[in-house]
Amino acid sequence: MTISLPDDLKYFIAEHGLFEGLTRNDSPGYVELWPIEGIPQENKAIEMDVCAPGFLAFAGNGSGEVLAFDAVGAVYMIPLIGMEAESAIKIADSFTEFAETFELNAE
């Protein structure tokens, strides 16, 4: 199964750049978005297709977990150690909903 990056992630990065910072809640607390062109390589390096099929990682939280989309674009947090699809914790229904928790600097 091939999972595509949601348009709202692409739009966010085009408008705000690669976010790296805190969220207004504890889940995940810290986010570092990966460059779009590097996402395939990052997923290959952490073996997402083997360990957590059905997910596409797009960011890290600096604490041993990745943030990933499922096939419908919902956002999940998945641990790198003991990574498996069953360990995924849903944190937002979409990237837009997730990005609303970012502490963005006033522009």
Image: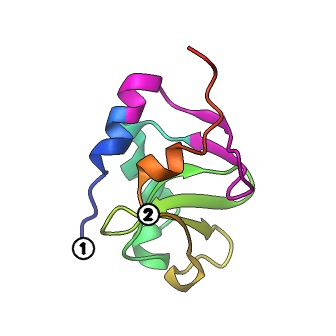
Residue name at image x 41 percent, y 41 percent: 38
Which amino acid, by three-letter code, is at mark 1? Met
Residue in the foreground of this view, choosing between 40 and 56: 56
- Residue 36 is drawn in which quadrant? top left
Q: Which residue is mark 2?
A: 93
Query: Callout 1: helix, strand or loop?
Result: loop
Q: Earlier in the sequence, mark 1 or mark 2?
A: 1
Residue in the foreground of this view, choosing between 80 and 18: 18
- Asked if residue 18 is among those painted magenta in the image, a careful observer would answer yes
The answer to whether 99 is drawn above or below residue 13 in the figure is below
The magenta segment is: 12-32
- Whole-percent x, y for residue 37 in the image: 35, 38
**Labelled disc at residue 90:** none
Residue name at image x 60 percent, y 81 percent: 87
Quick one: quadrant of the N terminus? bottom left
- Whole-percent x, y for residue 54 in the image: 36, 75
Residue name at image x 31 percent, y 51 percent: 5
Residue in the foreground of this view, choosing between 18 and 53: 18
Residue name at image x 41 percent, y 31 percent: 13
- Residue 102 is drawn in which quadrant? top right
- Asked if residue 20 is among those painted magenta in the image, a careful observer would answer yes
- Whole-percent x, y for residue 65 in the image: 65, 61
- Whole-percent x, y for residue 96 in the image: 42, 47
Quick one: quadrant of the C terminus? top right
**Labelled disc at residue 1:** 1
Residue in the foreground of this view, choosing between 66 and 42: 66
Which amino acid, by three-letter code, is at mark 2? Asp
Looking at the image, residue 78 sits to the left or right of residue 14; the answer is right
Query: Callout 2: helix, strand or loop?
Result: loop
